[in-house]
Image (cartoon, helix red, strand yellow):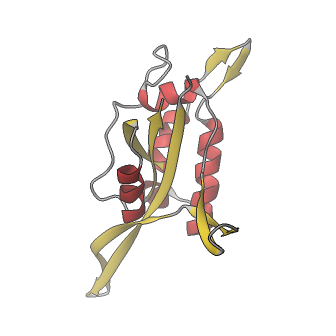
Amino acid sequence: MGCDIHVFSEYRELRYNYNKNREVIIGDKWISADFYQKIFNKETEEFEYILKHLYTNRDYNLFGRLAGVRNRNIEPISLPRGIPEDSCDLIKKAAKDFEYYHTPSYFTLQELTDASKNFFIEEWGEIINPLEELLIRVEIRAEDIFYSLNKEKRENFRIVFWFDS
């Protein structure tokens, strides 16, 4: 039986107030950055929205690097952190609706970028970075939201994920 990853993305919307010509952050809220596809259900004759998953590959080297899942030979970036308490409502609902999942965690885009630097393994005679494909997809999604990326924006975009078995 294989193991799959379920990856969701969200960004932090910062709320500012101006005090004496200075921006002051007065609050923040995490908002889903996931895309949904509108499809017509012929049985119910209604439109439904289906989540377009950010990443669906079964890559045990990546799973090991993210959370120590299915590959104990790769040091994980960190121990699993669980689902963030301040996560957006869509992610909380998805976690609640998904009965059997394990090892939930999350990383900001900046954390993924830092963890990706100088981390390579050998697989089938090739040198690879297990985070590379996921990182590219997360960066593209973040650019869809922010239009450009800098360190602050990378810290305000994150993935939340868990695994099934």
Q: Residue at x 44, y 21 (%)?
A: 75
Residue 80, image quadrant: top left
Q: Nearer the viewer, residue 86 or 148?
A: 86
Expressed as whole percent of the image width and height from the top left, the position of residue 62 reads: 55, 30
Residue at far front of view: 43
Residue at far right of view: 125
For residue 58, above or below residue 94: above
Residue 113, can we see it? no
Residue 77, image quadrant: top left
Q: Residue at x 61, y 31 (%)?
A: 58
Quadrant assignment for the N terminus: top right
Expressed as whole percent of the image width and height from the top left, the position of residue 93 reads: 38, 58
Name the side, left or right, on which 54 lies relative to 67: right
For residue 31, above or below residue 131: below
Q: Nearer the viewer, residue 87 or 78?
A: 87
For residue 2, above or below residue 89: above
Q: Nearer the viewer, residue 78 or 101?
A: 101
Expressed as whole percent of the image width and height from the top left, the position of residue 99 reads: 38, 43
- Total marks shown come to 0
Residue 130, can we see it? yes
Residue 94, image quadrant: bottom left
Q: Residue at x 57, y 59 (%)?
A: 142
Q: Residue at x 65, y 39 (%)?
A: 133
For residue 101, above or below residue 145: above
Expressed as whole percent of the image width and height from the top left, the position of residue 51 reads: 58, 58
